[in-house]
Image (cartoon, helix red, strand yellow):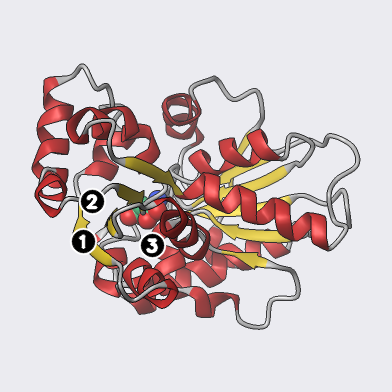
Amino acid sequence: MKNASIGAFDSGLGGLTVVSQIHNYLPNESIVYFGDTGRVPYGSRSNETIIRYARQDINFLKSNNVKLIIAACGTVSSVASSAADGLDVPYVEVVTPASKMAAECTKNGKIGVIGTAATIASNSYKNKILGINDDFEVYQYACPLFVPFVESGFVSPDDELVIGIVKRYVEPLIKDGVDTLILGCTHYPILAPAIQKVLGDGVKLINTGEAAAIEIKRILTENDMLADKAGESHFFVSDTTQTFIKTSEVLLGKTLDFDVKKIDIEKY
Ligand code: DGL
């Protein structure tokens, strides 16, 4: 079991930001990644649909005998935790670790959250943060255009179009006076340089993938499940593999040297 892979899934490619953090914190671990590129985005769908999709994603990863499953998607983490009910391996989502990290970081108690429409409507991060300390103030905004921007490769902080859209969504956080901002969707770390440019260096950005990777390391260490030799990662998608390869270069900042396979997720 120690050398089994970690299973990670996302509605599409944003979860690769979580994969890159797992590689940073746990370089020996191999990963089986599923990106539901044929059904992305999840963030604008009903909770029932997101739960059904998440169940299928989890079933696919289970069929690969993974030792832990990470929902590398802010939307699934926010509204579809029930999809993991009855799972016999540890399940990690991104909301809890990122909320804890934000609560530890803030000095003035004002925390911002940005995410998909479904994530923000669920109040998942807000409830979690207020559960830690109900004196905190939480300001949340949905940023529906960020995912298509990232998936299209529009991410540079030197691009006026990118800065324009980032300003439109995150400028209110300056008035709110937040000193900490959770990037509540796994696509958003790719826009971090542009977001930081608009908000200034006084605002600490929380990368949900980093918080989740630290949590995974804790769970694997405590349960004596850390891999003791480096393994091979495998990537799967539900639509054309070509788009995945191109966009993964934007998300991971490097070319994937692994195989990507297309699967029929409706079978799971
Ligand atoms: N990566 C997904 C998330 O973290 C966003 C994409 C989507 O809407 O499916 O919420």
Q: Does label 2 or label 1 sit earlier along the sequence?
A: 1
Inspect the image, locate mark 2, and give the three-letter code of the amino acid beneath it. Answer: Val
Badge 2, how many Cα within 10 Å: few under 14, some, many 20+?
many
Give the quarter of the figure containing the N terminus: bottom right
The first of marks 3 and 1 along the sequence is 3
User: In the picture provided, is 162 more to the left or to the right than 196?
Assistant: left
How far apart marks 2 and 1 lie (CA) works out to: 8 Å
x and y, in percent, of residue 217 in the image: 71, 51
Q: Nearer the viewer, residue 157 or 203?
A: 203
Q: Characterize the local packing of mark 1: few (<14), some (14-19) or many (20 or more) Cα atoms within 10 angstroms.
A: some
Q: Are marks 2 and 1 in contact (CB under 8 Å)?
A: yes
Residue type, label 3: Thr
Q: Which quadrant of the structure image shows residue 75? A: bottom left
x then y, percent, for residue 161: 12, 26
* Vertical arrangement, residue 195 with respect to residue 102, above or below: above
Residue 168, numbered label: none
Q: Which mark is residue 139?
A: 1
Question: On residue 178, which mark appears?
Answer: 2
**Amino acid type assigned to the residue bearing label 1 in the image:** Tyr
Q: Is residue 55 left or right of residue 53?
A: right
Q: Residue at x 15, y 28 (%)?
A: 163
Q: Residue furthest front?
A: 107
Pointer 3 or 2: first along the chain: 3
Left or right: residue 139 versus residue 69 is: left
Q: Quadrant of the C terminus?
A: bottom right
Label 3 sits on residue: 75
Q: Horizontally, is 151 left or right of 159 in the view?
A: right
Q: Position of residue 224 (x, y in %)?
A: 88, 58
